[in-house]
């Protein structure tokens, strides 16, 4: 989710625990727009016949925090990567790892681009 005017954080629907989880590299719990996003998700889920009216908003730990002001998107992508792999043990990354994380993401996208090009040439 885009928070404020220049920050990214991850909002997760945790159906198993009936909670909304926020992974925020700046850990600012007082942002007024996060509850607005949660309300939007509640309305969406109600349309899917899921009653999330009483679900709580939680900021899970561990949640690595950024040091500089411009890595929130990379942190958000790394949170998604770890959660998609169900690997919260790898939430051990830090600000010091961001150049490597950024390079790995770039390499992944470059490989995906060339794989797609190769597939389209075979068609």
Image (spheres, helix red, strand yellow):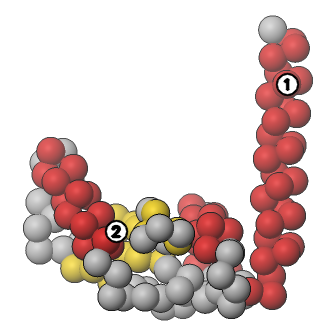
Q: Quadrant of residue 121?
A: top right
User: In what element is the residue under mark 1?
Assistant: helix
**At x 44% / y 62%, what residue is drawn?**
1
The quarter of the image holding the C terminus is top right
- In the image, farthest residue toward the top: 123
Residue 64 x, y percent position in the rendering: 61, 87
In the displayed structure, 102 sits above or below 17; it is above
For residue 94, side relative to residue 23 (left or right): right
Residue 45 x, y percent position in the rendering: 20, 52
| Res. 109 visible in picture | yes
For residue 89, side relative to residue 50 (left or right): right
User: In what element is the residue under mark 2?
Assistant: strand
Q: Earlier in the sequence, mark 1 or mark 2?
A: 2
| Res. 10 visible in picture | no
**At x 11% / y 67%, what residue is drawn?**
53
In the displayed structure, 59 sits above or below 20; it is below
For residue 91, side relative to residue 104 (left or right): left
Q: CA distance from mark 1 to mark 2?
A: 36 Å
Is 75 or 81 nearer to us in this picture?
75
Residue 31 x, y percent position in the rendering: 35, 81
Is 86 or 2 nearer to us in this picture?
2
Q: Which mark is residue 117?
A: 1
Residue 82 x, y percent position in the rendering: 62, 70
For residue 77, side relative to residue 104 (left or right): left
Is 14 or 57 nearer to us in this picture?
57
**At x 20% / y 64%, what residue is drawn?**
39
Tag 2 residue? 14
**At x 47% / y 88%, what residue is drawn?**
27
- In the image, farthest residue toward the front: 5
The local crowd at label 1, few if under 14, some if 14 to 19, many if 20 or more residues have their Cα within 10 Å, is few
Q: Quadrant of residue 60?
A: bottom left
């Amino acid at each position: 989710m885009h928070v404020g005017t220049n920050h990214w954080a991850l909002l997760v629907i945790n159906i198993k625990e009936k909670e909304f989880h926020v992974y925020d590299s700046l850990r600012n719990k007082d942002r007024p727009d996060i509850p607005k996003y949660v309300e939007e998700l509640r309305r969406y889920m109600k349309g899917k016949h899921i009653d999330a009216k009483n679900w709580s908003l939680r900021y899970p730990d561990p949640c690595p925090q950024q040091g500089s002001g411009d890595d929130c998107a990379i942190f958000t992508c790394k949170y998604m990567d770890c959660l998609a792999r169900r690997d919260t043990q790898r939430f051990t990354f830090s600000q010091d790892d961001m150049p490597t994380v950024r390079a790995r993401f770039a390499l992944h996208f470059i490989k995906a681009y060339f794989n797609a090009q190769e597939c389209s040439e075979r068609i």
